[in-house]
Image: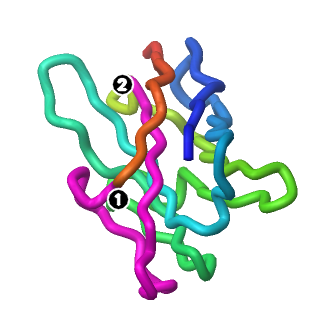
């Protein structure tokens, strides 16, 4: 599966953005999908994930502010980001994990994802 992330941009603190992860050459609903971010000079970090069965997982830093959803008809996954903070500034990546029978599971580790999209940059000004 090939992934394309989009929707990044410049927003003021407290604002919102919705990131999209669109898939081609595969059916995204067959995978767990995660969002990660990477700030300059830092490691790529887990943000949110949705399992094959719809279970969702969030980093503590974004709980209550970000929502991950899946649209099977559009073969896409979205990350709604509300109440954005300057520390959310980073390049955001989506990734797909083949569930191998664990339909409830979506990993938080970078190395458990099999396919990655290119990043989309999010900048939150204070």
Q: Which mark is residue 90?
A: 2
**Which percent across, then down, holds residue 120?**
50, 22
Q: Earlier in the sequence, mark 1 or mark 2?
A: 1
Q: Residue furthest front?
A: 25
Return the x and y of residue 65 as percentages of the image width and height: 54, 52
Task: Tell which of 102 and 119 is nearer to you.
Answer: 102
Observer-nearest residue: 38 or 116? 116
Q: Is residue 98 left or right of residue 74?
A: left
Place of residue 116 in the rendered image (x, y in percent of width and height, measured from the top left)? 42, 39
Q: Say which quarter of the image contains residue 91.
A: top left
Residue 108, label in figure:
none
Q: Is residue 111 magenta?
A: yes
Identify the residue under disc 1. 59
The front one of 101 and 13 is: 101
Q: Residues within 10 Å of mark 2 (few under 14, many from 20)?
A: many
Specify whether residue 2 is painted magenta.
no
Is 53 on the left or on the right of 94, as rendered? Answer: right
> How far across and down, in percent of the image, does residue 89 sit?
38, 24
Is 73 on the left-hand or right-hand side of 69?
right
Question: At x 57% / y 75%, what residue is drawn?
Answer: 52
> Circle 2 sits in a helix, a strand or a loop, which is it?
strand
In the depicted structure, whether residue 70 falls above or below residue 104: above
For disc 1, the neighbor class at 10 Å (few under 14, some 14 to 19, many from 20) is some
Magenta region: 90-113
Residue drawn where x is 45% and y is 87% of the image? 101
Q: Quadrant of the C terminus?
A: top left
Residue drawn 54% across the image and 65% down it = 31
């Amino acid at each position: 599966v090939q992934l394309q992330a989009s929707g990044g941009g410049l927003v003021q603190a407290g604002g919102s953005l919705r990131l999209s992860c669109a898939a081609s050459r595969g059916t995204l609903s067959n995978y767990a999908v995660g969002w990660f971010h990477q700030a300059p000079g830092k490691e790529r970090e887990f943000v949110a994930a949705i399992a094959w069965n719809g279970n969702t997982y969030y980093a503590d830093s974004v709980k209550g502010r970000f929502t991950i959803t899946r649209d099977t008809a559009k073969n896409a996954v979205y990350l709604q980001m509300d109440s954005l903070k300057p520390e959310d500034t980073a390049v955001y990546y989506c990734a797909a994990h083949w569930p191998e029978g664990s339909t409830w599971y979506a990993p938080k580790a970078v190395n458990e994802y099999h396919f990655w999209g290119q990043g989309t940059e999010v900048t939150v000004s204070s």
